[in-house]
Amino acid sequence: MASIDGIQSRRYAMKKTTSNSPAETRALAVEIARTLKAGSVIALHGQLGAGKTCFVQGLAEAFDCYNVTSPTYTLVNEYRGTMPIFHIDLYRIGSAQEALGFGLDEYLHGEGITVIEWAERASELLPDTTLHIHIDPGKDENERFISVADKQ
């Protein structure tokens, strides 16, 4: 099972792991969720189909939020559970200015956990405390290389 050893604090430096299934990716997200608090921001990086939404599903399940789908066309999905999850997808955004236009800055300082797919499109707006997670496909269909870092 995918696991990042030593996750005990909000600061990670750089940790890497391999996931061999969507279930392992979701389980890793649950493990990371245990270290988060209200106001946390996660930037997800990875190509289309890398598993970013799968990761968010695991994270949301840790806070009793279900039915997570990609917000590519709606930009933001809000999930209510034991902790609100704000799932943002900036794929269709052309600039940080556009992101400000729909209120990204309000989510970055909200009462829940903000998870942003394609976060690099508004990187200059992200707080210094943002946790960056990179998901890259491996050779096998379900293999993913996942890196967790304090900095992009």
Image (cartoon, helix red, strand yellow):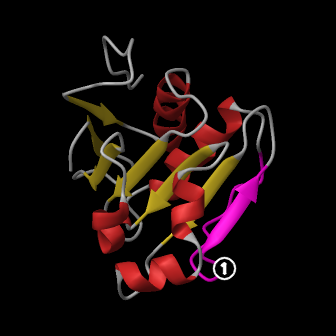
Does 54 sit left or right of 122 as displayed?
right
Number of residue marks: 1
30 is within the stretch colored magenta? no
Quarter of the image for residue 51 reads bottom left
10 Å crowding of disc 1: few (<14), some (14-19), many (20+): few
x and y percent of residue 81 in the render?
81, 38
> Can see residue 67?
yes
Tell me which residue sits at (36%, 44%) in the image. 130
Q: Please, is residue 64 above or below residue 103 in the view?
A: above
x and y percent of residue 142 in the render?
39, 49
Tell me the element at label 1.
loop
Does 90 sit left or right of 146 as displayed?
right
Mark 1 lies on residue: 74
Q: Please, is residue 64 above or below residue 89 in the view?
A: above
Tell me which residue sits at (42%, 22%) in the image. 1
Q: Which one is nearer the viewer's eye here, 151 or 108?
A: 108
Does 5 sit left or right of 23 as displayed?
left
Q: In terms of secondary structure, what is the magenta stretch mainly? A: loop
> Can see residue 47?
no
Span shown in magenta: 66-79
Q: Please, is residue 38 above or below residue 85 in the view?
A: above
Identified by mark 1, the residue type is Thr
Q: Which one is nearer the viewer's eye here, 134 or 97?
A: 97
Tell me which residue sits at (30%, 24%) in the image. 11
Q: Which one is nearer the viewer's eye here, 52 or 86?
A: 86
Tell me which residue sits at (70%, 55%) in the image. 68
x and y percent of residue 91 in the render?
43, 78
x and y percent of residue 23 in the render?
54, 36
